[in-house]
Image: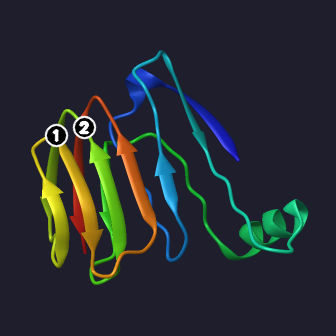
Amino acid sequence: MTKFFSASSIKELEAATTGGSLTLTGDAGSKATVEVYASRSNWSAEKIKQTLEDNYTIDIRVENLRFTLPAGKGFNLNVKANRIETSGLKNFRGSTESKHIEGTIGIGGPEINVRSSQRVSLSFE
């Protein structure tokens, strides 16, 4: 699934997964592209697409630059931004700076990779 937006209209990006990985990349160009990829061993692209359509909500829309992740779950974080704010960050091992957070929550888990020239807010709820 692919959607295109004017980069100036993007203020917030909310991404969530109950299992799997999220990789979010971008730049300050005039057009923003949001792409969703899914894979599963021994499943055809058509079966994956049908399963996603039947059982999941994939909502891509323009809002602000904020990530809400489930508290108590493990993640591997690598976030670089103009400024990073966090709330509810617990059981974290790694380095935290105002512009870069890299490390592991709990025993680790899905990769959360974010690069932004904007402010990023990470909430764990």
Q: Look at 37% across and 46% down and name the residue there.
A: 114
Q: Which residue is mark 1?
A: 99
Residue sitting at 36 percent across and 65 percent down? 76
Amino acid type at mark 2? Ala
Left or right of 14: which side holds 57? right
Residue 71: x and y in percent read 27, 79
Reading the image, the residue beneath label 2 is 81
Residue 108 in picture, x, y percent from top left: 36, 75
Looking at the image, residue 21 lies above or below residue 18: above
| Residue at 40% in and 58% down | 112
Amino acid beneath label 1: Lys
| Mark 1 crowdedness (10 Å alpha carbons): few <14, some 14-19, many ≥20 | some
Q: Please give left or right for residue 99 compared with residue 51 in the image.
A: left
100 or 61, nearer to the observer: 100
Pick the residue in front: 17 or 78.
78
Q: Is residue 89 above or below residue 26?
A: below
* Residue 14 seen in the current view: no
- Among the 4 quarters of the image, the one containing residue 94: bottom left
- The mark found on residue 74 in the picture is none
Mark 2 crowd level (few <14, some 14–19, many ≥20, 10 Å Cα): some
**Residue 37: percent from the left, percent from the top?**
67, 54
- For residue 30, side relative to residue 77 (left or right): right
Cα distance between the residues tagged 2 and 1: 5 Å
* Figure quadrant of residue 72: bottom left
Residue farthest toward the top in the current orientation of the protein: 30
Q: Indicate the secondary structure of the residue bearing disc 1.
A: loop
Q: Residue at x 32, y 42 (%)?
A: 64
| Mark toward the start of the polypeptide (2 vs 1) | 2
Q: Are marks 2 and 1 in contact (CB under 8 Å)?
A: yes
